[in-house]
Every structure is written in structure tokens, then in C-alpha cells.
Image (spheres, rainbow, N blue to C red):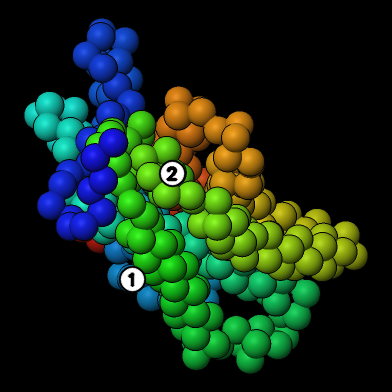
């Protein structure tokens, strides 16, 4: 085999997820449609929360950050996939691949921690409503959000540094539609077992710890909701929390299935399908879930549209 670890003057080849059969052309068009909905939905959510002063609360600030992360995540993978498919040029430089890994892992990690922060926010709002403005004031909310971004970025830097330390052989075909670090393992000429253990530890930190925090938060929320005497209060608490739980279930379920299974049972086709779910479909569903199940968001959107005379 030809060793190519001395310089970075080579390109990887992204094999992609679609061929040019009629079925795959339809699926590619469907993915572009999902991407459009995800891009527009998350952009609208960020702009709506920024423009509507009534939504300038910790809960909606955190929601705007979630939408921003989803917007960046879906933009990290789909445009490159679409350009490669339409142009037939499937190559990606080492720098481009590294940038995808950095952004992709950083955003996944940041979103994991942010979802835990959102669960804590709901816990304080339901269980300690009189102390909410103290426990979740603007300064605390911003600090927790910044911490989510920083922790996610640190995880991305660690994974990127490890991935760039690999020695790659003559076969540089990545069986994926973007540079997922797990898809690089088969291309390495060196033993990647130590890095696979590092990746597993990162996944434990990114997934298990936030999930544990979410479970603890919602255990307290559930106990508080059961004790509520007012049916209207119970319904309002259930509605706001169920939206977040729906997002948590979709996101963490797919991520755990992808990254916490033994590498020996991974298959390229399976990994591509699961990755497509939480990098393309989940970002589309998040703004729909929150806008359809949240009266304040729906009301704010209608008010903004009327103000702009769009309806």
C-alpha cells in the first residue's frame, strides 16, 4: 500500500448516499425538500425570537440557540452532498474534510449540552416558578449557553486532532455522504483502537451525562405536574415539556444508536441512514414540533406576518 501521511496534498472521495437511478433521484429531491424546510424553519425560528420582544425569555433564547445549531448542522453536510451529486465531483480536500468533522462534532456536542440546559430551564419553571427569574436570569442563561458551545467545540477539536493524526493508505474512498470520523477508521493504515476508545468516552460525556441531567430534571417536573391542582396549569406544563421531550427522544435516540454501538457491528449503509436522520430530518422536525405545539411561537409568527402584511 502507498502511505500518504507525509503531506496533506490529497483528496478524499465521498461515495455519497445516492446513485442516478429513478428511485434515488426521487430520494435526492426529497432530501433537498427536507433541507429547504429545515433551513427556512430554523431561520424563521431564530428571526422570530429575535424580533418578537414577548419571546425574549430564557426558554425562547435557548430555543433560538437550538435552531441556530440545527441550521448550522444541516448546512454543514447537505450542500456539499448536493454539489457532489449534481456535479459528479465527489472529492473533498483534507482541509474541507477536517472542517466538516470540526463543525459536525462541535454542533452535535453543543446541542447535547443545550438540550440538558433546556430541561433544567423547564424544571426551574415548573418546580420553582417563584424563583425562576433568579435561578434562570439572563446572565445565568447566557453563561450556560456559552458553556454548551464551548464544551461542544472542545469535543470537536479533540476529535479533529485525533482524526488528522491518522496515517491514510491509497484507498481514500469514504463510504458516507460527509466526513464522519467513524467512516475514516477503515481508511487508516494505523491502529485506531485507542481513538475508538477516545470517541466512546466523548460520546459518554456528550450523551450519557446530559441524558442523566434530563432524566433528573423531568423526574422533578413529573412529580410537580402530578401535584398540580389546576387542569389548565397541568396542560400548559405538559405541552411545553412534551415538545422538548419529543426533540430529546429523536436526537439522543439516533445519536446513541450511531455512536454507542461496537464498531464491529457498524455497516456503511446503516450508518448513512442513521446519520441522515439526525443531521437532516431532526433539524427539520425541531422547529415544526415547537411551532405547532407552542402557542406563543404560533401567535408570534402570526403577529409578525400581519405586521409585515404577508397575510
Label 1 SS? helix
Name the residue at the top extreme. Answer: 22
Distance in Å between CA atoms under marks 1 and 2: 42 Å
- What is the secondary structure assignment of the residue under circle 2? helix
The correct choice, above or below, for 166 with respect to 180 in the image is: below
Label 1 sits on residue: 50
Say which of marks 1 and 2 sits in front.
Answer: 2
Most extreme residue toward the front is 1
How packed is label 1: few (under 14 Cα within 10 Å), some, or many (20 or more)?
A: some
The image position of residue 35, as x and y in percent, is 30, 39
Q: Residue at x 42, y 49 (%)?
A: 190
In the rendered image, the vertical position of residue 273 relative to residue 136, given as above or below: above
Q: Where is the N terminus found, in terms of image quarters?
A: top left
Residue 32 place in picture, x, y as percent: 26, 32
Q: Which residue is mark 2?
A: 185
Residue at position x 51%, y 28% from top? 267
Q: Nearer the viewer, residue 232 or 78?
A: 78
In the rendered image, residue 198, in percent from the top left (x then y), is placed at 56, 61
Q: Quadrant of residue 53?
A: bottom left
Residue nearer the viewer, 80 or 269:
269
Q: Residue at x 87, y 64 (%)?
A: 223
Q: Which of the two labelled residues, at mark 1 and mark 2, occupies the earlier sequence position?
A: 1
Q: Is residue 244 left or right of residue 77?
A: right
Residue 77 makes an appearance in the image: no
The image quarter containing residue 301 is: bottom left
Amino acid at each position: 500500500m502507498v502511505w500518504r501521511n507525509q503531506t496533506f496534498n490529497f483528496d478524499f472521495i465521498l461515495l455519497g448516499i445516492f446513485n442516478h437511478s429513478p428511485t434515488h433521484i426521487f430520494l435526492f429531491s426529497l432530501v433537498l425538500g427536507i433541507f429547504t424546510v429545515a433551513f427556512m424553519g430554523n431561520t424563521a425560528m431564530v428571526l422570530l425570537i429575535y424580533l418578537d420582544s414577548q419571546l425574549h425569555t430564557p426558554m425562547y433564547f435557548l430555543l433560538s440557540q437550538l435552531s441556530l445549531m440545527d441550521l448550522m448542522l444541516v448546512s454543514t453536510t447537505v450542500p456539499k452532498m448536493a454539489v457532489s451529486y449534481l456535479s459528479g465531483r465527489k472529492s473533498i480536500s483534507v482541509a474541507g474534510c477536517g472542517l466538516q468533522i470540526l463543525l459536525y462534532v462541535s454542533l452535535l456536542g453543543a446541542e447535547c449540552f443545550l438540550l440538558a440546559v433546556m430541561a433544567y430551564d423547564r424544571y426551574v419553571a415548573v418546580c420553582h416558578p417563584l424563583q425562576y427569574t433568579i435561578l434562570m436570569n439572563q446572565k445565568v442563561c447566557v453563561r450556560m449557553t456559552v458553556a454548551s458551545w464551548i464544551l461542544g467545540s472542545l469535543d470537536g477539536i479533540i476529535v479533529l486532532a485525533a482524526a488528522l493524526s491518522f496515517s491514510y493508505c491509497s484507498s481514500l474512498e469514504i463510504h458516507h455522504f460527509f466526513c464522519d470520523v467513524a467512516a475514516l477508521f477503515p481508511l487508516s493504515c494505523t491502529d485506531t483502537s485507542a481513538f475508538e476508545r477516545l470517541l466512546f468516552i466523548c460520546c459518554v460525556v456528550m450523551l450519557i451525562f446530559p441524558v442523566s441531567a434530563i432524566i433528573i430534571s423531568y423526574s422533578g417536573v413529573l412529580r410537580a405536574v402530578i401535584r398540580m391542582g389546576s387542569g389548565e396549569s397541568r396542560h400548559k406544563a405538559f405541552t411545553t415539556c412534551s415538545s422538548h421531550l419529543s426533540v430529546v427522544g429523536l436526537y439522543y435516540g439516533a445519536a446513541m444508536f450511531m455512536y454507542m454501538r461496537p464498531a464491529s457491528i457498524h455497516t456503511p449503509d446503516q450508518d448513512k441512514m442513521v446519520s441522515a436522520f439526525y443531521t437532516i430530518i431532526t433539524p427539520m422536525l425541531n422547529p415544526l414540533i415547537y411551532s405547532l405545539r407552542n402557542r406563543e411561537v404560533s401567535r408570534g409568527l402570526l403577529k409578525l406576518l400581519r405586521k409585515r402584511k404577508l397575510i
